[in-house]
Amino acid sequence: MSVTRFRFPFVEMPAEATQLRQEVREFLAEERANGGYTPMADCWAGGLSAEFSHKLGQRGWLGMTWDKQYGGHGRSFLERYVVTEEMLAAGAPVMAHWIADRQSGPQIIKNAAPEVRDAIIPRIVAGECFCAIGMSEPGTGSDLASVSTRAEKVEGGWKVNGTKLWSTGAHGPGCDYMITLLRTSPLDTSARHKGLSQFLIPLKSEGVDVRGIADIGGQVHFNETNFEDVFVPDSHVLGEVGGGWNMVVGELALERSGPERFLSTFIVLQEAMRLLVNNPTDQTKEVLGQVVAKIKTLRRMSLGIAGLLQEGSSPEMEAALVKDMSTNFERELLEKLRRILPQNVLYSSAGLLPTLLREGVLRVPSSTLRGGTNEVLKGMIARQLGIR
Ligand SMILES: Cc1cc2nc3c(=O)[nH]c(=O)nc-3n(C[C@H](O)[C@H](O)[C@H](O)COP(=O)(O)OP(=O)(O)OC[C@H]3O[C@@H](n4cnc5c(N)ncnc54)[C@H](O)[C@@H]3O)c2cc1C
């Protein structure tokens, strides 16, 4: 049996990252004090503020790792890690730019036509243009190769028909594009991953209809997007026609690898600790000790992934492992906190901690689904270990 090891290199934060952390903390403290935002749980998937994203763009905190020749800032993955980690820990409203900064920008830089890339990347870096992901469909989630939304070749471009589902943020102001996985040739059941292509579809195109879907808590953050005879020019095909599958695999590595997978509910823990550290019971000490130890471990692994990205690797398997462990931890964290928090917090509807807890409890079930379910990730991990 051949066993491929997972790599989580030890990463030391460089001095410039420490200084940057201080700057980010000062910015966040000032914003919060001035009413620029109210902390929320799961802020990267629910805190929509184009204005806040624009401010980050002005600070140089979007497109940080992208090459300067394309309009990025040419900084390290560790520096980007510091910014994302601090934003998440503060519960800041970072949803508007999150997808574009995390995965769409890198795809566009690598695969878009130069004139398209040059028109879009500087706008993403400035926090003026955002993107959505169009992979899932009504009948397609885990088994992505079964997408049926299709693009047919027409004069000068492609005609797109079909429906994408759960597209996070597609309804938001400034969300101008969806990177969309489409079938460009009929399904061949013996080679299901062939005949798929990625398109950069302008969401303002004629024939695109984005409709919000409310989640269990009544919040609209994802959508159903219908495409009816939508014309997409040839220039908006990403990479090679038919090469969509490999692109999606690379994109999912970026989607799964960041600190948002274990820090979505960190703000709840932080606020809870302010209360719980006063006269803690033995049970409280034990629970807090356990969760802090787990966060430390997950962070160490997650930083290792940032190190792999820095060296140019595509850490798909490491990302799958960390996402599986992290999202399980997020669920466990809230369950544990509910056991040790006082009744007046658990049953209150007012105040920051009860609000954060409610947001966390309502949103955390989605963490083991979005970006690939944990069952699917476990299948990938088992294959990597050679036991499946
Ligand atoms: C909050 C949220 C945001 C999202 N945002 C986006 C987005 O922006 N863009 C986008 O394209 N999609 C998005 N999604 C969709 C998400 O990627 C899918 O929900 C996910 O991939 C699962 O697909 P599905 O819902 O169709 O479930 P299914 O694939 O139908 O799975 C149903 C169940 O079967 C299990 N299962 C399926 N296949 C296997 C297998 N091979 N082995 C073991 N178990 C299996 C799954 O684990 C799951 O429990 C989002 C989802 C959520 C919850």
Image (tube, rainbow, N blue to C red):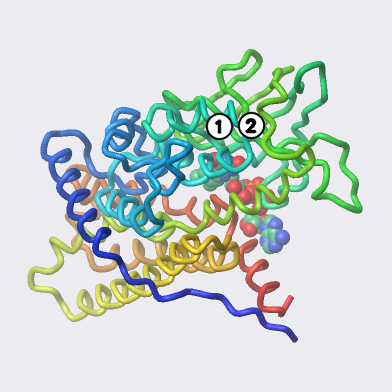
Residue plotted at (58% across, 31% down): 178
Q: Nearer the viewer, residue 173 or 120?
A: 120
Disc assigned to residue 191:
none
| Residue 216 can be seen in this image | no
Which residue lies most toward the bottom here? 1
Residue 155 sits above or below residue 258 on the image? above
Q: In screen coordinates, is 324 left or right of 142?
A: left
Amino acid under label 1?
Answer: Arg
In the image, the residue with mark 2 has its CB under 8 Å from the nearest atom of ligand 1: no
Amino acid under label 2?
Answer: Ala
Residue 82 sits above or below residue 351 on the image? below
Q: Could you say whether the residue bearing mark 1 is in a helix, strand or loop? A: helix
* Residue highlighted by disc 2: 113
Q: In screen coordinates, is 381 left or right of 190?
A: left
Residue plotted at (22% across, 37% down): 37
Check whether the beta carbons of the residues at disc 2 and disc 1 lie within 8 A of each other.
yes
Which residue lies most toward the top here? 206
Task: Name the quadrant of the C terminus.
Answer: bottom right
Q: Nearer the viewer, residue 345 or 377?
A: 377
| Residue 107 can be seen in this image | yes
* Residue highlighted by disc 1: 117
Can you tell which quarter of the image residue 45 is in?
top left
Residue 122 sits above or below residue 91 on the image? above
Task: Name the quadrant of the N terminus.
Answer: bottom right
Where in the figure is residue 386, as x and y percent of width and height? 71, 79
Residue plotted at (68% across, 26% down): 235
Where in the figure is residue 240, as x and y percent of width and height? 75, 39
The Cα atoms of the two marked residues, 2 and 1, are separated by: 6 Å
